[in-house]
Amino acid sequence: MESVTFTLNGVPRTVAVEPGLMLLDVLRDVLHLTGTKRGCDNGTCGACTVVVNGKAVKSCTFPLAKADGAEITTIEGLAQGEHLHPVQQALVDAGAIQCGFCTPGIVMDLYALFETQPDAPQQKIDNVLNRHLCRCTGYETIAEAAHLAQERIKETK
Amino acid sequence: MEGKYVGQAVTRIDARSKVTGQALYPGDFVMEGMLYMKLLFAGRPHARVLRVDTEKAESLPGVVAVFTSRDVPFNEYGLQYPDQPVLVGPPGDPEAARQLVGGGIGRDEVRFVGDQIAAVVAESEEIAAQAVDLIAVEYEDLPVLSDPRDSLKPDAPQLHPKYPGVSYHPELVFEGNIASRHRIRRGDVDAAFAQAAVVVESEYEIPGQEHIFLQPEAGVGYVDDEGRVTVITSGQWAHEDRHQVAHALGLEEEQVRIIYPAIGGAFGGKEDLSVHIVLALAAWKLHRPVKLVWSRTESIIGHHKRHHVFARARWAAAADGTLLAAENYVIADAGGYVYTTNKVMGNLLLTCNGPYKIPNVKTDVLGVYTNNIPGGAFRGFGAPQGNFIAEAQMNKLAEALGMDPVELRLLNVVQGDDPMPWGKPLPDDARGLVDTLIAAAKAVGWQQTEQGWQAPACAPRPGDPPTLKRGVGLALGVKNVGFSFGYQENAWAAIELRGGREIEAAVVYAASSDVGQGTRTVIRQMAAEALNLPLELVTLEPTDTGITESSGSCSASRMTFMIGNAIKGAAEAALQKWADEDRPARAEYTYLAPKTTPIDRETGYGDPNFSYGYVTVATQIAVDTLTGQLYFPKMACANDVGQAINPRLLTGQIEGGVIQGLGWATTEHFIEKDGYPLTKTLSTYLVPTIVDIPDELEAIVIENPEPHGPWGARGMGEMPLIPVAAAVQAALHHAVGLWYDAFPFTTERVLRGLKLKE
Ligand code: FES
Ligand code: FES
C-alpha cells in the first residue's frame, strides 16, 4: 500500500492510500476531522469544500492520491484560538448560520477567494456562493456575510 | 412585549461551534470499538419477500452481524400508526407477530422502494456495503399503484390489510386503499351554485417536495453506562422517537435513550424515524457502538415527501364579490405507509377554504395509499397545498369578477366572530390577516385609490426586451400553531438555580430539537428574561431523554409558543423555591395549552386549534417568454408573529421559508415513475441556489400579540412558505394571461403553456 504525505492545518500528516479514496473520506473517517461535511454523493452541494494549495476544492471528489505534498486547510485550521477568521466572524455577525451544515464549506470557499483576491468583484463572489447549497437561510444573509467579510479583510490589508 | 432579552437579536449560542467546525452532528460521532452499518433497501415498489439468504454476507470477513425481519421483536412502527415493518420479511416469532396491529399480516410485503430488508453490521463501512451486495433476496413482484386516483378504483389491489382503527385518530379509516378520510359540510352548496353570478371551477395538481435538509440521516447507537440502549441522532421529538424505538424492540421506554446533538436541518423530514430503530436493535444485540450514515440518495429514497395532491375546486361568488360557496375534492398520495398523512390531511382540510366567510362549504379530502414514497410532514403540513387551492380560486374569482384581488379578500376575510368553515371563529381577533395582506401588497406596489386597492401596472421597464412580461400576484395564508383536534398540547421544562446568596447559574432543561431554527438560543433568551438574570448566567442542557421530560415536537410552528410558556412556569416556580431558600432551587413545569376538540367526522364542526399564524406573500415577476425563465425583482412576505423573540433568527425563518416555497413553486420537481423515484440526486432534484432567489426579498414583521403566547409570541416557522406558490401562480397569470394549474412552474412548463396559448 502506498502512502501520501501532506500538511494539514500546518501539521505534516502521512496516510495510506487505498484506491478510490477521496480526501473527504480521509479527513472524516481516518483523521476524524469532522468539521468538513458530506451533503451529497456527487459533488453538487459544496459542504465538503476545503482549501488545497490555496484553492478551494470539493474534497468529496478530490482523489487522495492528488494530495501528496499539498498544503491543506480545513475549517478546523482557520480560527486562531479564540479569534475567528474574518470570514467566520462575518457569518456569525450577519446571522448567516442556521443548521450550519453548509457553513464550513462556504467559509472555506470565501476564505480561499479573499486570500487570493481581496477585492474580488461581486460576480466572482456570486460564482463562489453559487457552488453551495443552503437549505435553511435563503442565501440573503450569506451574501451579506460575504460582503461584510470582504470589507473587513480589505480594511486590514 | 419587548424585554431585556425578548425582542433582541442575540447571537445564536451555537454560532461559534458551527462556524469553526466543532459542532457535532449525528454523523460526526466516533466511539471506541465502533462498528458500521449499511442497509439493504428493497429498491422496488411492491413485492412480497419470500426468502432472505444472508449466509454469504455473514461469512464475509469483517462482518459482525446481519439483521433481518426475524430479529426485530415487534416488527412495526409509525408515528401515527404502526403500519410499516422495521425490516420487511417473514416473521421470526409467529406468536409475537400475531400481537402486531393487523395480526402481523403483510409484514413480508415491500410497499415502496425505501422499505428495508436487512441491516449489516461490520468492522468498516466498506465491508458492510460489500456484504449488503451478498444478500440474496427472493421477491415475488406485485402490481404497482403509482397514482392515488388509480388506488381508488374498485379493482385496485389493496395495499394493506384492514387495520383496526384507534379512537384517538378517528380519521384513520383504512377503507380499501383510503388511509384517512376528512370532510366539511356546511350549508347547501348546490343551492348556492344555482344562484351565483360567478363560478370558478379548476383542477389542480400540486407537487410533492423533497426536504433536502443538508445533513442526511445518521446516528450512533450504543448501550450507555446505565444499560440503556442509546441513539445519538437527529429528529424532531426525542421522546416520541424513544417511544417508537421501545415499541419495536419490546423494551420499556426507560430502557431507551435518545440524544439530539447539532442537527443539519429537518423541515418536517425528520419527524418520522429513519436510522433509529435499526441502530438501537444492533447496539442492543451486539453491545457495541454502531454507526449508520445515509447517503444523499438513500436519504431521498428513504424518507417521506410533501404530499402530491390532486384537487378539483368549484367556488361561487355573487356579483359584488361576496363568496357564496366552495366545493373542494382532494386526493393526496399517502405513498406506502401512513406516516403523518392523517394529520397533514386534517390541516389541508382546514386550510383549503382559506380564512374566508363562506356560508356553503363542501370539502372532501382523502389520504390514499400507493406504492410511492410516503407522503408526510414538510414545513406547512398540508397548509401549503390547501392554501394553493384556496388562493388560486380567490385569484381566479377576482379576475372573473373584475375585482382587485386585495379588494376581494378584504370583502370576504373573516373578522371578529365570523366563523371559519368548521363553525368557530379564529381564537384571537386575527387582525394579522388584513395587516399582512395590506403590508405585503403595498411592498410590491399595490396602491389604495378612490376605487379601492389597485395592483400596479406592470409596464415594461426601460431596457426590457419585448419578450419579457411583468406581473404581480399575492396570496394570503393561515395555519394553526401547535397540535390539533383535541390533543392536549403540552410542553415540559425545568430550571435549576445554583448559588449561595446570589444566583450564580441557571441551568435550563428542555427537550427541544434545534434543527437550525435556533430554538436553543430562543429558550435561553426566554429563560434569562423570565428569571431576570444576565444571559451569561443561563445555560441549557442537551436534548436527552435521559435528563428531560417531553417538550413535544419541533413542528407545527409550536416550539417557541409551547416551551416559552413552560419556561415562564418553571422560572416562576424556581424563583419561589429560591426565595424559600432551596439550594439548588429546582422546579419543573408542564404547560398545557388551551383545549381543542376533534372535529365532527361528518360535518367537520369543532374547535380544532388554539392558535394560528397569519401571513401574506406578494411578488413581482418577470417572465422571459422566449425561454420560459422566471425572475423575481421583488418579493415580500409579511408575517404576524405576535412578538419576535429574536428578530434576527425570525427573519432567517422568513427568508429561508420563502425560498423553500419558491423552490417548491419553480425548480423542485420530484418525479416518480411506476413507484421509482427518478430524481435521486442533487443534480436532478434542483433546490434553489443563490442565483435563483429574488433580487429583493422584504421580510415584514407585524406584531399583534397572541393572547396565550409567551410575551405575546405566536408560532411562525412554517408560515412564510405557505402562500408562495399561489402568489407566484397569480403573478405568472398577471404577466402572461395564463393560469398554470399544475406546478412547479419550470421553464419547460411555462413554455409549454405559452405554446399552447398561441
Ligand atoms: S459532499 Fe456535496 S459536494 Fe462534496
Ligand atoms: S444553514 Fe442549514 S444548510 Fe445552510
Image (tube, coloured by chain):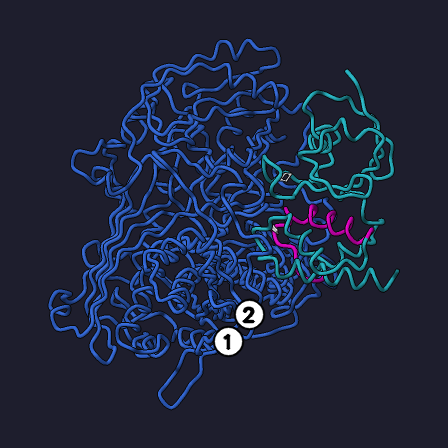
Chain colours: A cyan, B blue
Residue at the spot x=44%, y=14% of the render? B136
Q: Amino acid at mark 1?
A: Ala
Determine the chain carrying the residue at label 1.
B
Magenta stretch prevailing secondary structure: helix
Q: Is residue A31 something that shows in the picture? A: yes
Quadrant that contains the N terminus of chain B:
bottom right
**Residue B752 placement (x, y as % from top left):** 37, 53
Q: Is residue B219 magenta?
A: no
Evaluate if marks 2 and 1 touch, with contact meaning CB atoms under 8 Å apart: yes
Residue at the spot x=32%, y=44% of the render? B333
**Residue A155 placement (x, y as % from top left):** 85, 64
Q: From which residue to which does the magenta span run?
A: A93-116
Determine the chain carrying the residue at label 2.
B
Q: Is residue A113 magenta?
A: yes
Which residue is label 1 attached to? Answer: B443
Residue B96 versus residue B409 in the image, above or below: above
Residue B255 versus residue B609 in the image, above or below: above
**Residue B319 placement (x, y as % from top left):** 21, 79
Q: SS class of the residue under badge 1?
A: helix
Residue at the spot x=30%, y=63% of the render? B607
Q: Amino acid at mark 2?
A: Glu
Q: Which mark is residue B698?
A: 2
Residue at the spot x=34%, y=79% of the render? B407
Q: Quick one: label 2 or label 1, which is nearer the N terminus? A: 1
Q: SS class of the residue under badge 2?
A: strand
